[in-house]
Amino acid sequence: MKLHILRSTTPDPRERGREIGTRYTERVRDVSARYLAHFEVLGIPDATVREIAAASQDALRDWYPDLAEESDGIAEAAGIEPWQAAAVGARTEVLAAAPVPGTGECTTAVYAPPAGGPPETIQTWDWHDSLTPDGLLLSLVTGAGRRVKLFTEFGTAAKIGVNDAGLGLHFNILRHRSDSAAGGVPVHAVARRVLEEATTVAEARDLVASAKVSASTVLTVAAYRDGRAEAASIEMSPSGLAVLEPGDDGWLIHTNHFLGAGLADGDLSVPETVSVERYEHARAVRGGMTGRSAQERAAAFCGGDGAAAVVCVRADPSQPGHERWGTLLTVSLDLPGFALAYRAGTPDTAAREGLEQF
């Protein structure tokens, strides 16, 4: 995956959308076409995609109109239909309508030192390499003057990021029995609003709770203020929320199955073992990641052999794109430094080549 950096200075959301759509016209069009083709391969009819995109955009416009304006600005400047941009922005909501869910995805580990000090985080982002040949690192300023840095796909609002209030966010998709094709507030937009407005874990939880969603996700939020760190994994589903706090050792691990009481019974990933394997792997290596630099953390994340297959996934080129998964990004959040440390590819690549700063 090739990463592109945009430092936007306009606080106007529609103008920011036009800026993205103008500078990255071909990439916006390409990602839209790839996702629409992907939905078709998964057995989601075009009419259903349009309905979910429209319903999600309406829900977004009611809940946080700035991001609906940004999406429309991207579509306008890139020369695609507004619903096509909205379908990418609501790609998780559309995927909730797929007859068979995917089995891959992400691993997040966050350490909030009990004795004080900034959070130490790491995440792998696993996805279809055929859908995301390009990714966006976006720096922006909100109308209220908040500065945000984030990683995302072209057309989605946010995935992983930090703000200048000392709050950071990691993102993992979940799947729940209550997910539907109703088209709720896009979960990527929920992540974006948390980054734009929240300064504490409690504020993040309240923002998440205010969104009526149709698909499930967990946002692992960390904040740092006055020398102390706090963190929580906020699991969201159409049937409700669960908030998980770090263990006694300060670590908070999440992959792609529900952990919260009351929601785990509806989890749709339980028959799939890969999420549990990644969760257990991260728990097993967390001691080696404690108190390390981002590069050292990436090395420890891989495990003793330096390249644990469960978190260092190499896409199999012999597989069709809709079945092919790979670890496309390794990222760590620096809350005091208001920065993302990242490397395209697997943690062992990050450990070997180092991480770049954004």
Image (spheres, grey):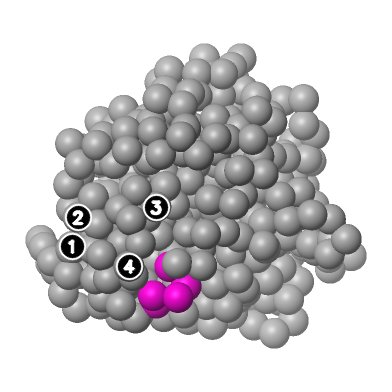
Horizontal and vertical percent position of residue 123: 59, 58
Horizontal and vertical percent position of residue 206: 26, 34
Residue 84: numbered disc = 3
Residue 13: numbered disc = 1
Q: Which kind of residue does numbered mark 1 sit on?
A: Pro
Q: Which kind of residue does numbered mark 4 sit on?
A: Gly
Q: Which image quadrant is residue 18 in?
A: bottom left
Task: Sort mark 3 into few (<14), some (14-19) or many (20+) by Cα contacts within 10 Å.
Answer: many
Q: Which residue is mark 2?
A: 69
Q: Is residue 209 above or below residue 319?
A: above
Number of marks drawn: 4
Confirm or deny contact between disc 4 and disc 2 (CB under 8 A): no
Residue placed at 52% from the left, 59% from the top?
33
Q: Earlier in the sequence, mark 4 or mark 2?
A: 2
Whole-angstrom CA distance, mark 4 to mark 3, is 10 Å
Residue 79: numbered disc = 4
Front: mark 3 or 2: 3
Quarter of the image with the N terminus in it = bottom right
Q: Which kind of residue does numbered mark 2 sit on?
A: Glu
Q: Which image quadrant is residue 69 in?
A: bottom left
Quarter of the image with the C terminus in it = bottom left
Q: Residue 337: tell me if it is visible.
A: no
Q: Please, what secondary structure does the residue beneath circle 2 have?
A: helix
Q: Is residue 104 above or below residue 259?
A: below
Horizontal and vertical percent position of residue 291: 59, 65
Q: Earlier in the sequence, mark 1 or mark 2?
A: 1
Whole-angstrom CA distance, mark 1 to mark 2, is 6 Å
Q: Please, what secondary structure does the residue beneath circle 1 have?
A: helix
